[in-house]
Image (cartoon, rainbow, N blue to C red):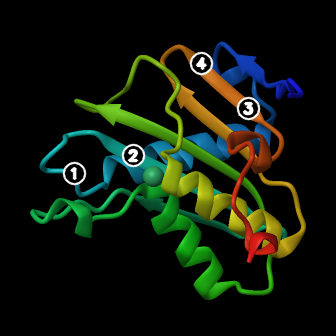
Amino acid sequence: MTKKQYSFDYEHFATAKELPQQDQELVEMAIEAAKKAYAPYSNFNVGASILLDNGTIVTGNNQENAAYPSGLCAERVALFYANANYPENAVKTIAVVAMKNNELVSTEVAPCGSCRQAILETETRFKTPIKMIMGGKAGFNIINNATELLPLSFTGDSL
Ligand SMILES: [Zn+2]
């Protein structure tokens, strides 16, 4: 038996104002997107904004459904829109925030497992690291590539 270890570094910013200007803009756009989410069942409004390598920013929010599994997370709504409309452009950064009662939730939001898988696919597809900004009232966690969000991941290389 060989014992192995996996670890990664991430950055934490206590407030949005400490973020670089471009990241602040992405967070603002994610917040605006969250306000437009369709989340009548959970009242957990999530917004995502995505910066592409051509400077384009697209946004998305969670879209729930009475048949719960038919809905989709904000990250994938934004990501699939980006990949559908800009298939030649790498995703550089994704900002995601969650809101309840029109306020950021207390802790930094984190993408679900399915979104992590979809984000990793995009990172692999374009061979470009995707920076993730994950916000809440407690601040903003930042990682500099999606691989770190999904250790020992399943990718096309496994097929
Ligand atoms: Zn998700």
- The amino acid type, in three-letter code, at marker 3 is Ile
Q: CA distance from mark 2 to mark 4?
A: 16 Å
The quarter of the rendered structure image containing the C terminus is: bottom right
- The amino acid type, in three-letter code, at marker 2 is Val
**Mark 2 or mark 1, which is nearer the start of the sequence?**
1
Residue 74 is labelled as none
Q: Nearer the viewer, residue 43 or 22?
A: 43
* Residue at mark 2: 46
Task: Give me the residue at 35% from left, 63% from top.
Answer: 72
Q: How many residues crowd around disc 2 within 10 Å: few (fewer than 14), some, or many (20 or more)?
A: many
The quarter of the rendered structure image containing the N terminus is: top right
Q: How many residues crowd around disc 1 within 10 Å: few (fewer than 14), some, or many (20 or more)?
A: some
- The amino acid type, in three-letter code, at marker 1 is Ala
* Residue at mark 4: 139
Q: Is residue 120 above or below residue 80?
A: above
Q: CA distance from mark 3 to mark 2?
A: 17 Å
Whether residue 54 is visible, yes or no, is: no
Q: Nearer the viewer, residue 42 or 147?
A: 147
Q: Give how far across and how far down residue 6 sits, in percent.
A: 82, 29
* Residue at mark 1: 39
* Residue at mark 3: 142
**Mark 1 or mark 4, which is nearer the start of the sequence?**
1
Q: CA distance from mark 1 to mark 2?
A: 9 Å
